[in-house]
Amino acid sequence: MFAVAQSVALLAAARLVQGVASATTWLTVTVLLANASAPNQRGAAFGRLVSLVAWGSALGAAWTTLA
C-alpha cells in the first residue's frame, strides 16, 4: 500500500494496517513465549527476546546502509 499510495489518507491507512499487524504479532509472540517457558525462567526468556529484537534492529539498519 505504501508503494502505490496516491494520497496522505491512503498512507495513513497503510500505516494503521501495519501498526495493527505489528501489535498482533508482538502480542502473539509474547503469549507463546510465556506459555512455553517455566515461570521461574520467564524473565530470562523475555530478556533474550528483547535483546534479539534490539540486535535485529541494529543489524538490519547496518545491512541496509551497506546495501
Image (cartoon, rainbow, N blue to C red):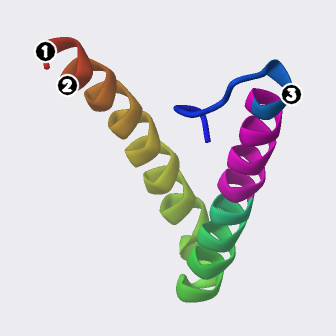
Q: Which residues are magenta?
A: 11-23
Which sits earlier in the primary sequence, circle 3 or circle 1? 3
| C-beta proximity under 8 Å, tags 3 and 1 | no
Type of the residue with mark 2: Trp
Give me the residue at 73% from left, 54% from top.
Answer: 23
Instruction: Specify the quadrant that holds the C terminus.
Output: top left
Q: What residue is pinned by disc 2?
A: 63
Q: Nearer the viewer, mark 3 or mark 1?
A: 3
39 versus 42 height, above or below: below
Quadrant in which the N terminus appears: top right
- Checking the image for residue 9, the label placed there is 3
Residue located at (81% from left, 42% from top): 16
Mark 2 nearby-residue class (10 Å; few <14, some 14–19, many ≥20)? few
Image quadrant assignment for residue 15: top right
Return the residue nearer the eye: 30 or 25: 25
Amino acid type, mark 1: Leu
Under mark 3, the amino acid is Ala
